[in-house]
Image: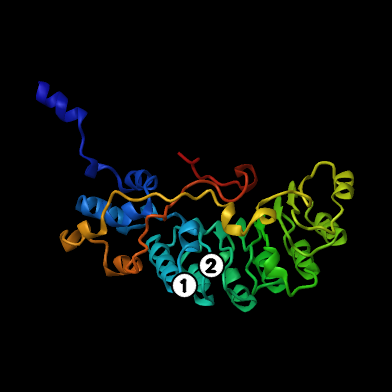
């Protein structure tokens, strides 16, 4: 009798549904998910190889530290491919080329949050890919210096449910620009459902902001840090229900460069890559996975985080679980 009770109390992990295992594995660093879990047992390996762990992918901090653009490209292709079209959030800094955005558009059509700051994408590729990203509700294209009003208009035209936009620039990005009124007009004319807008350091005037407010009547939050020619007092008087941040706010740009804004902190892994070399190949994730960190940088700094996008969840309508 005692043995039966013990058998009922302790159940095998491998008997859990793949969806349940995927939810558990999401709380682990990606390094462990890709290289440790598949070696535990075959059922875990199948879960990692499937879409269960890859519905939301955040590799922004890791991608900021990569010196080889091709590393970023290969990682994006690997993780988005594994999602099987079910990915709902992608956050990566510095997409190195247009084909990667096209790849995302082809393989992540359920995407709801696209965060690709400092990416080397063009207006023409955005105009081509935007129709495939119609489900996007939050977009971060901060410091994407090769795109402008054409790209913003394309996103607005095809992403009908867009409620959040982050287009924050760095002062260095704007050294050769006089103004960005065309971008403000594109936002005003194509994104009427915006509720959260960040335009830090954009070269715009009060008139350009008023045009946006006149068309985006659901706007609740407006970030104007560094937009020195905007009269924020006038805006607050005319739109008392609007939360305005800036333009006179002391932030990281006033103190140092962009990277110092991050709350990232390095942490070494307890797992040795050398130790993994002699494990049976069956449990290895695959040659493509291993090659991504062959340059010695590894994935110690890479995590997949699963919580709401870059703004308050009350704006997004996201159904994602809160961060553990």
Q: Marks 2 and 1: in contact by CB < 8 Å?
A: yes
Q: Which residue is drawn at 79% across and 51% down?
A: 217
Which residue sits furthest top?
1
| Residue under label 1 | 69
Q: Horizontally, is 69 left or right of 193 in the view?
A: left
Residue nearest the observer in this picture, 10 or 243: 243
Residue at x 84%, y 50% (from the top left corner): 232
Above or below, comparing residue 36 to residue 237 in the picture: below
Could you say which disc has been placed on residue 317 in the image?
A: none
> What's the colour scheme?
rainbow
Indicate the quadrant containing the N terminus: top left, top right, bottom left or bottom right: top left
Res 6 visible: yes
- Report x, y in % for residue 309: 56, 50
| Res. 163 in view | no
Determine the residue located farthest toward the front in the rendered image: 255
Q: Is mark 2 on a helix, strand or loop?
A: loop
At a point 79% along the width and 45% down the height, the residue shown is 242
Give the number of marks: 2
The residue singled out by tag 2 in the image is 94
User: Of marks 1 and 2, which one's residue comes earlier in the chain?
Assistant: 1
In the picture provided, is 262 more to the left or to the right than 212? left
Horizontal and vertical percent for residue 68?
44, 72
Q: Residues within 10 Å of mark 2 (few under 14, many from 20)?
A: many
- Report x, y in % for residue 144: 62, 68
Quadrant position of residue 189? bottom right
User: Left or right: 28 with respect to 87?
Assistant: left
- C-alpha separation, residue under disc 1 versus residue under disc 2: 8 Å
| Quarter location, residue 128 | bottom right
Q: Quadrant of the C terminus?
A: top left
Q: Where is residue 35 in the image (x, y as percent from the top left)?
A: 28, 57
């Amino acid at each position: 009798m005692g043995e039966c009770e013990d058998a009922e109390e302790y159940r095998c992990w491998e008997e859990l549904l793949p969806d349940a295992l995927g939810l558990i594995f999401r709380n682990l660093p990606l390094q462990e998910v890709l290289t440790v879990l598949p070696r535990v047992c075959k059922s875990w390996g199948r879960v990692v190889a499937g879409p269960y762990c890859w519905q939301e992918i955040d590799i922004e901090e890791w991608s900021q530290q990569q010196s080889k653009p091709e590393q970023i490209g290969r990682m994006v292709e690997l993780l988005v491919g594994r999602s099987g079209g079910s990915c709902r959030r992608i956050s990566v800094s510095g997409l190195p080329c247009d084909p990667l955005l096209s790849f995302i558009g082809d393989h992540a059509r359920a995407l709801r949050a696209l965060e690709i700051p400092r990416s080397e994408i063009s207006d023409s590729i955005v105009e081509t890919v935007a129709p495939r990203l119609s489900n996007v509700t939050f977009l971060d294209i901060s410091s994407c210096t090769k795109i402008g009003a054409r790209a913003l208009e394309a996103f607005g035209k095809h992403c009908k449910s867009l409620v959040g936009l982050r287009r924050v620039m760095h002062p260095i990005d704007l050294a050769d620009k006089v103004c960005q009124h065309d971008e403000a007009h594109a936002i005003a004319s194509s994104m009427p459902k915006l509720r959260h807008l960040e335009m830090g350091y954009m070269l715009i005037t009060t008139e350009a902001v008023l045009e946006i407010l006149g068309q985006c009547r659901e706007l609740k939050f407006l970030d104007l840090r560094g937009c020195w020619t905007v009269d924020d007092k006038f805006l607050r008087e005319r739109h008392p229900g609007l939360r305005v941040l800036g333009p006179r706010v002391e932030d990281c740009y006033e103190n140092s460069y962009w990277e110092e804004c991050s709350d990232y902190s390095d942490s070494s892994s307890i797992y040795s890559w050398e130790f993994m070399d002699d494990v049976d190949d069956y449990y290895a994730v695959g040659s493509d996975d291993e090659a991504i960190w062959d340059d010695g940088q590894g994935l110690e700094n890479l995590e997949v985080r699963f919580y709401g996008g870059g703004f308050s969840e009350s704006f997004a309508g996201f159904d994602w679980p809160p961060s553990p």
